[in-house]
Amino acid sequence: MSNDTIVAVGTAPGVGGIAVVRLSGPDALPIALQHLSAGQLESRRATYCNFDELDDVVATYFPIGYSGEATVEIACHGSVYIQQTLVQTLIGSGARLADPGEYTLRAFMHGRMNLSQAEAVADLIEAATPQQHQLAVSQLRGGYAEKLRSLRTKLVDLTSLLELELDFSQEDVEFADRIKLEETIGELRTEIDTLLDSFSMGNALKRGIPVAIVGRPNAGKSSLLNALLNDDRAIVSPIPGTTRDTVEETLTINGLTFRFIDTAGLRQSDDPVEALGIERSRRAIDDAMLVLHVIDATDPTQADTGLLSGKETITLYNKCDLSRRNASEATDALCISAKTNEGIEQLKAMMHKRMQETVSGEVMLSNTRHRDALLRVEQALVNAAAGLAADTPADLVAVDLRDALYHLGTITGEVTSNDLLANIFGRFCIGK
């Protein structure tokens, strides 16, 4: 990491009432003072002054700021001209323009946060719903990191015992009770499995809970999607098989984002294009966390799709404005009309309730990179357990445990590479 002083606009691009320019690094204060009418800046005290007759500003000095370095934040009027001129002036005095995510990278390098917390900063910036915000804040404040730290401590203890045996290999001494080792590895795998199991919901909260709208042709699936969105997003036609491919749209209901997939009607078809759409529908059902099974209330033969076993499903009898007889005979089903909007608000409330009940207060995994690393940790622990069961020499079991430690370290930042850091922080905005 370079030790120079960096500068960038820390607020959103474009015109605004106020913009904040952040100067960070060892020369942040002397560079800023070259242009501020204030003779000095007191630590952590906002000072009203002028910047080179360009604008009246409020400057604040932090001996240790967000990045873990000396930082001066200059709040100016949000004119694009003022922002650009202020930044270029500071660059001319010895600073350089910050790279994307460099402030957060420096915070990580200075030990202000671990790598998983740094990634949560990007999630916090992108959060668009209360649940996404809560998930990012939980990870940023360290609940998730604390869980990982606990796992790492247990792994280090395990590995240390075996490494100690290797140091005394000539003495034929066994420091690690094999039965206790197997029990501890089993406990670690249980904790990791719990985290991995939470990924489905964590990722769904982050990107939208996948909801498949399924049923036979002409049941009103596309009409239902349009009614939910209050927009003519999907093509509606009385001709069966109009929807040939999946159509995706998102909708936020009371803070939960749902990602709806309108699927092709489920039936046997000789049309190769429609058949391809039906196959994609089947895959959408497999991937969905919630299924809306739409049945034509005027045609009871539509009730069976044969694909929904084991899925969280809400059964909907559509076209209840035309017929209610079949719907009234069904249990645990909701009678709706996508045409008149009857039951649509009730359906939204039901969807929210079903999914809200699955969201627990436990630590939740939402990052794909972290999931992949934990899968590798788990596999290394499986190998170590198998080695212990087969009475494999301690040095070979220790290799598997070190492998588990390595992959766990890539999540929190104990193990890093330049490529990894560039990939993570490259998706940040320049001012963060």
Image: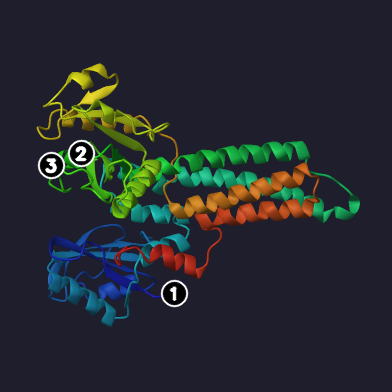
Which residue, given by chain and number where applicable, does mark 2 sit on? 218
Q: Can residue 279 be seen in this view?
A: yes
The span from disc 1 to disc 3 (Cα, nearest Å) is: 52 Å
Nearer to me, 418 or 16:
418
Residue 227, numbered label: none
Looking at the image, residue 418 lies above or below residue 411: below
Which residue, given by chain and number where applicable, does mark 1 sit on? 2
User: Could you tell me the amino acid type at mark 1?
Assistant: Ser
Q: Residue at x 51, y 58 (%)?
A: 413
Across and down, in percent, residue 89 comes to 22, 79
The span from disc 1 to disc 2 (Cα, nearest Å) is: 62 Å
User: Could you tell me the amino acid type at mark 3?
Assistant: Asn
The residue most toward the top is 329
Cβ atoms under marks 1 and 3 closer than 8 Å: no
Nearer to me, 192 or 284:
284
The span from disc 2 to disc 3 (Cα, nearest Å) is: 19 Å
Across and down, in percent, residue 124 comes to 32, 51
Residue 230, numbered label: 3
Q: Tell which circle, 1 or 2, labels the residue nearer the N-terminal end.
A: 1
Q: Which of marks 1 and 3 is in front?
A: 3
Across and down, in percent, residue 276 comes to 34, 52
Q: Residue at x 32, y 36 (%)?
A: 291
The residue most toward the front is 270
Q: Residue at x 23, y 46 (%)?
A: 241
Number of numbered callouts drawn? 3
Cβ atoms under marks 2 and 3 closer than 8 Å: no
Q: Tell which circle, 1 or 3, labels the residue nearer the N-terminal end.
A: 1
Q: Say which element carries label 3.
A: loop
Q: Tell which circle, 2 or 3, labels the residue nearer the N-terminal end.
A: 2
| Quadrant in the rendering for residue 257 | top left
Q: Say which element carries label 1.
A: loop
